[in-house]
Amino acid sequence: MKLKFDSENLINQAKAKIKNWRLRFITYIKRLLFPIYFFPIKLFTYSIYYFIKSLIKTFIQLIKLVWFCLRWPFRSWNNFFKFLFWGTIFTYFAFTEYRFLSLVERYGGYNKFFCSEWLTTKKLQKSVVRVVGGYSEGSGFFVAGNEVLTNFHVIADEPSPKIIFPDGRFVTPRFITANPDNDLAILHLWEQYPDKILNFVSPQTLTTNEPLISAGFPLGTDLTGVVTVTKGNFTAIRNSPDLFADYVQTDINVVQGMSGGPLVDQCGDVVGINTLSLSGMSLFVSSDSIKVLWPYFSDQEITKIEVDPSLSPEDAVYAFYTYLKARQMQEGFDLLSLKYLEKTNFEEWTSRFTDILDVQIYLSEAVTGSENTVFVKFSTKIWTGNEALYHYYQGTWQTVEEDGVYKMLKSNIKEVEEPTWEWFYDLEEE
């Protein structure tokens, strides 16, 4: 019974307090609202009053807190040493946090600070390829499943450059489009490689001195191994009346052979393409400019293969090796005479040339006094999977006219071991 009494008493007390609070609240609202014509004035004055009152209280409490902090270390030696200890800890962490925030800002923010440079390097090693033309060599990278971006000067005057993958395989592009004014070209492949695509990001997001990474193959096929990755810092975005695009300036040293390779941020996103380097300063066509110019690429200034084996025996021999150079194997096979085809077929014949990266024709000239015979000088660049080997040849081809086209009948071609410089310039029949 006593427990029940106590519970009822507590409940009654709680009800009384709630009733009292409710009556006070109602009274306050009535005083605030009535008379109604004083309500706006009361609302304004009460607001100012309570705001000033809270400010004064806060200021007084702040003064008390400061006074307490100033007095507390000197109340005892124990307090003094505690103050020194915790003050040192606080200062250390505050300074460390400042340094950390500065470092994060230098990397371009938290999203880039925590990106792995090791993973970015692995990504570049998978996506950056060699681009080998007959007159120049450089680098390139995938911007779409079947599109490789490079510099125009890497493939200029070359109708059939080769793309060498990191695993040593190489292919010939289906066709090429370019924007020569801005030194850009896209090699369109037959097959898709979606896992090798690098994404673009605007260089406008870069911060001063932010780390950037450039990738490419210095010295082209003369230097074996995986893609070279070099690191530097962002300087600025440059443009001038003489330049048709915006350029990202860095302090990275880009050397011959790295032209056409990507410039990426810490996370591996492309901000530019390797284009020009002068004494420790490099310029890269910006990703923003690439995206703007991309729809206007064309094949108008791309060198085309123009041969006519019906004109003469020497034109037929020149066409034959040109097709080998371009890896247009069916067209080259079609220039073999019926007599020659008695001892080979397409599969056997093409298997002889699977590793030929390039063919350079120095001379294709009719032999005086020997009908339908042509003297030829040429070289081949053989790709072994990790390095290029050069071979030099000279000799004669006998041709025969079939269906209005001169075709290959019989060869007498010999390899020239270590030719002297005169061999390249003496372009007459030997």
Image (cartoon, grey):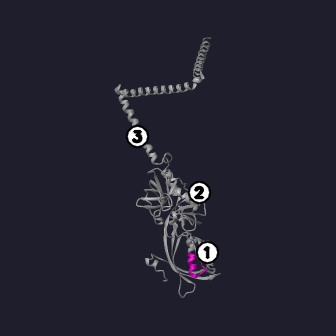
Provide the residue designation for mark 3. Answer: 95
The answer to whether mark 1 and mark 3 are in CB contact below 8 A is: no
Which residue, as the protein is rendered here, is positioned at the far right? 403
Q: Is residue 314 magenta?
A: yes
171 or 212: which is nearer to us? 212
Q: Residues within 10 Å of mark 3 (few under 14, many from 20)?
A: few
Question: How many labels, in total?
Answer: 3
Q: Which residue is mark 1?
A: 333
Disc 2 marks which amino acid?
Answer: Pro
Q: Is residue 301 magenta?
A: no
Q: Amino acid at mark 1?
A: Phe
Which residue is disc 2 drawn over? 194
Give the numbered dot on residue 368.
none
211 vs 413, nearest the viewer? 211
Q: Secondary structure at mark 3?
A: helix
Element class at badge 2: helix
Q: Amino acid at mark 3?
A: Phe
Write the start and end of the magenta stretch as one range: 309-321
